[in-house]
Image (cartoon, rainbow, N blue to C red):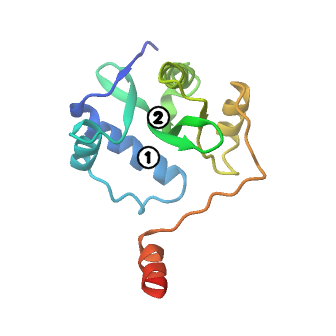
Amino acid sequence: MEFTIRAAKEGDMPQVLNLIQELAIYEKEGDSVEITADDLIKDGFGENKRFHCFVGETDGKVVGMAMVYTRYSTWKGTTLHLEDFVVTEPMRGSGLGSALMAETVKYGRDMGAKRISWEVLDWNEPAIRFYEGIGADVMRHWHVVQLDEESIAKFLKNKG
């Protein structure tokens, strides 16, 4: 199946949101997505652009996406964080994922990123195989640490 990879446009954001929701369901977090297509438009195309997004498209439909933003490492300098990387199930194995990843890596290189990083769930073996297959180091000895909105409020109330 043929596809094209391109920078996302504002009009793609409803389809990008569908992919985000598809990923959340796959990751057993279907009720966790709070963002809207309008939020994506504001944050990705507004005055203070917070992310860059690539989409994979076939027959006028967005069937894959990679969303990235810049971070800063005190060890490396400028880095790129891959927030979400999604290919719809029917397109897996078509080469779309490799093409999206290649576009993402080129973007990182061209911006001078010293590292590109992302997370993967430990049970997502197909993704882990894909990432290791492209030469990524899946660092199993690191743990993701987060404060959610409720935890932020609780921490600040107690330490405020």
Q: Residue at x 55, y 64 (%)?
A: 146
From the viewer's perspective, is 107 left or right of 17?
A: right
Is label 2 in contact with label 1 (beta carbons under 8 Å)? yes
Whole-percent x and y of residue 55? 39, 27
* Residue nearest the observer in this picture, 76 or 45: 76
Quarter holding residue 156: bottom left
Vertical order, 70 against 92 (above or below):
below
Q: Where is residue 142 in the image (x, y as percent from the top left)?
A: 73, 53
| Residue 83 visible at all | no
Type of amino acid under label 2: Thr
Work out which quarter of the rendered image holds the C terminus and state it.
bottom left
Residue at screen point 40% across, 27% down: 54
Q: Can residue 90 be seen in this view?
A: yes
- Quarter of the image holding residue 8? top left
Q: Name the residue under label 1.
A: 22
Nearest the viewer among 50 and 4 is 50
Question: Quick check: 46 left or right of 104?
Answer: left
Q: Which is more N-terminal, label 1 or label 2? A: 1
Of residues 56 and 10, the one drawn nearer to the viewer in this rendering: 10
Instruction: Give above or below for 153 relative to 118.
Output: below
Q: Which amino acid does label 1 sit on?
A: Glu
Q: Distance between the residues labelled 2 and 1?
A: 8 Å
Give SS at disc 1: helix
Which residue corresponds to mark 2?
88
Nearest to the observer: residue 11 or residue 72: 72
